[in-house]
Amino acid sequence: MAEDTHVLDRPPEGASADWTIPQNWDAYTPEEHATWDRLFARQAKLLPGRASEAYLKGLDALRLSDGGIPHFEELSERLMKLTGWQVIAVPGLVPDDVFFDHMANRRFVAGNFIRRPDQLDYIQEPDVFHDVFGHVPMLADPVFADYLEAYGRGGNRALELGALKQFGRLYWYTVEFGLVEEAGNLRIYGSGIVSSFAETRFALEDPSPNRIRFDLERVMRTEYRIDDFQQNYFVIPSFDELLRLTLETDFAPLYGTLLAQPDVPVGTILPEDVMITRGTQEYAEAKV
Ligand code: FE
């Protein structure tokens, strides 16, 4: 997601007018491929039984593996056949309207660089492991693929209506940090979780965070943390339901209501929340 830091106002040298750049796959060093492989092997072991079926199916169908950093063109070819999406490289973060335009046209923008070996567990800007391993498997799911396209279309409307912050929270609490209920079990599907060794277990198994039934208005009022594990996760009943809500909601009047209400701080439980897990917040409080 485009956090609005370090964003340039026009494409840098070497980038096209739509901000894309060549992935430059041949330039990856053996060490960089090895970093991908280490991260991949670690997550592949952890995710079965924790990640959503849709995610695991996508990982398989796209043949992502520990065979080095994927080639975006080959990956796009497979993805195109499944859901009509492509993966394109961009130089780090891009302006919001560019991000939304690509998304509305089923192009997922990905960073082409990979974290250094000493950054396996934390990076500030999304790298190819976060963007490709974290996000792309869900794009192979037809329902989620439609959701993300709808999100892209909604983005530019939110920009016009001055509600980017509210709309961005929907992305944060679904695409980046979402949980879903599958056959009575909690599963992770958010890219920020599935690409993180520590947060995979924290989001599902730690007693600290709140796990709250997803509610569109509630989510769009809720602040989030960019510096540490989330204090709230929101649980959708299914991807069909998430897509239906997004397509059927008239966002313009909803923004009017939301902008008149106070934001909800992280870790807060509201009286109307449907709790799946009431968190202890022990983890967050230990850090204060
Ligand atoms: Fe992301």
Image (cartoon, rainbow, N blue to C red):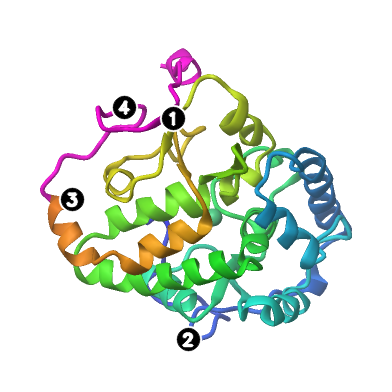
Distance from Cα at disc 2 to Cα at disc 1: 39 Å
Per the image, label 1 sits on a secondary structure element best described as loop
**Kind of residue at badge 3:** Leu
Per the image, label 4 sits on a secondary structure element best described as loop
**Kind of residue at badge 1:** Gln
Task: Decide if residue 1 is in sight here.
Answer: no
Question: Mark 1 sits on what residue?
Answer: 231
* Residue 16 vs residue 243, the one in the foreground: 243
**Kind of residue at badge 2:** Ala
Question: Mark 3 sits on what residue?
Answer: 258
**For residue 59, above or below residue 268:** below
**For residue 244, above or below residue 224:** below
- Give the percent coordinates (x, y) of residue 83: 63, 77
Q: Which residues are magenta?
A: 260-288
Magenta part mainly helix, strand or loop? loop
Q: Residue furthest bottom?
A: 17
* Residue 166 vs residue 6, the one in the foreground: 166
- Give the percent coordinates (x, y) of residue 133: 70, 56
Please report whichever mark, 2 or 1, sits nearer to the chain's N-terminal start: 2
Question: Mark 2 sits on what residue?
Answer: 17
- Give the percent coordinates (x, y) of residue 205: 62, 26
Question: Mark 4 sits on what residue?
Answer: 268
* Residue 76 vs residue 274, the one in the foreground: 274
**Kind of residue at badge 4:** Thr
Distance from Cα at disc 2 to Cα at disc 3: 35 Å
**The magenta stretch spans residue 265:** yes
